[in-house]
Amino acid sequence: MRDSWHRDAQLIRQAIPDFTGLLDRNGILGLACDPDVESRLVVREGRRWHLEHGPFSMKDFARLPAGNWTVLVQGVNLHLDAADRLLHRFDFVPAARLDDLMVSYAVPGGGVGAHFDSYDVFLLQGPGRRRWRVGRQPSHELRPGVPLKILQRFVHEHEWVLEPGDMLYLPPDYAHDGVALDECFTYSIGFRAPSRTELAGEFFSDLATRIDLPGRYADPGQPATRAAGRLPAPMIDATADAISAVRWNRSDIADFLGVYLSEPKAHVFFDPPEKVPSPATFARLLARRGVALDRRSILLYGPKAVYLNGECIRFPRGVPKALMELADRRALTTSDVPGAVVRLLRAWFADGFLTARSTAEEDDDA
Ligand code: SIN
Ligand code: CO
């Protein structure tokens, strides 16, 4: 973070030694056939590029040539606990910045062409090898008439062949072109970097639903007019007054941000447990096994509130330590939790936002 974040590309050989990936060919192609999963197929024929969006059927893949195509599956962390654990190995970056884990599968020659993304990315090599060419560009001009963002002229500064477990960090707007040398899997840990327009626009559209100002426009001094079409100047002034009476503060901004960033993506559904434990059983479960956030849950906190999956829960006297720990580590094992927090955790458990800690998580801790 100190040396490279937002500054320079960095190649980390054996970032995750012996990384063998989390999915095989059928696993990833199967996900690309699921209507609740966002997926793309990119096929290159010489200088021509074809792009199709999923869901696909296995027959679509059987028809493809032996080389020069790739399938990319977004949000794999939402579907696979191991993928969620991999994504959260990157928790040295604030969770508010984390987007998703994308996995690509490519046959030899497959790739998405030379392009740049507007956010940081870690590209972790799974099975197979990929040749990456990367570099800053004098021009970000894109090739016209292509269904993908492909740079018109791409000049690379570095060329590296990544082997399983190697990882490449790229800052925003840093151009890259990855071509599969073998059948290859790439795991992209992506971050979200909302534009200023998006942040301000979303804040005001949220604020608009909560505006509640007393009074109504009145014009007791209005004389008879010969210019019925003209907007009355006092009406413009009164509107300006109403607008300037809308107030917000930093805590409203934190609440907006927490709710906005923790909102589940489209197609995310939680699985509530069949049976909700009694308060006493739940307290025992918390003390003995502990609880963990479901892989689909996003939990963030600010000075006076926590935000879980698009909901804001306020704590005027400060956020309880146990909830900060749950948000930071995505798991909590302790019996030292105030009763009100245990009740809240049990309600989250009932919604499927939380689960009992699994053996895999206990192994991770070890
Ligand atoms: C890929 O996995 O082929 C593309 C990843 C990226 O360029 O961001
Ligand atoms: Co990219």
Image: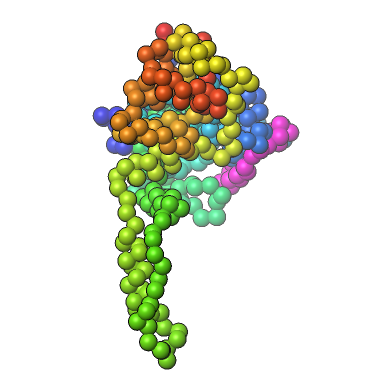
Q: Could you tell me residue 6's position as x and y percent?
A: 31, 37
Tell me, yes or no, whether the highlighted magenta stretch contains residue 18.
no
Q: Could you tell me residue 97's position as x and y percent?
A: 39, 35
| Residue 22 in view here | yes
Q: Could you tell me residue 340's position as x and y percent?
A: 41, 23
Vertical placement of residue 172 versus 89, above or below: below
Q: Is residue 42 left or right of residue 209?
A: right
Vertical placement of residue 89 versus 41, above or below: above
Please state the extent of the stretch shown in magenta in the rendering.
43-62
Q: Is residue 332 left or right of residue 247?
A: right
Q: Could you tell me residue 87's position as x and y percent?
A: 45, 26
Q: Is residue 183 left or right of residue 136?
A: right
Residue lying furthest right: 59
Q: Kindly identify the residue that appears in the image at 50 percent across and 41 percent down.
A: 113
Tell me, yes or no, whether the highlighted magenta stretch contains residue 50.
yes
Q: Kindly identify the residue that appears in the image at 58 percent across and 47 percent down.
A: 48
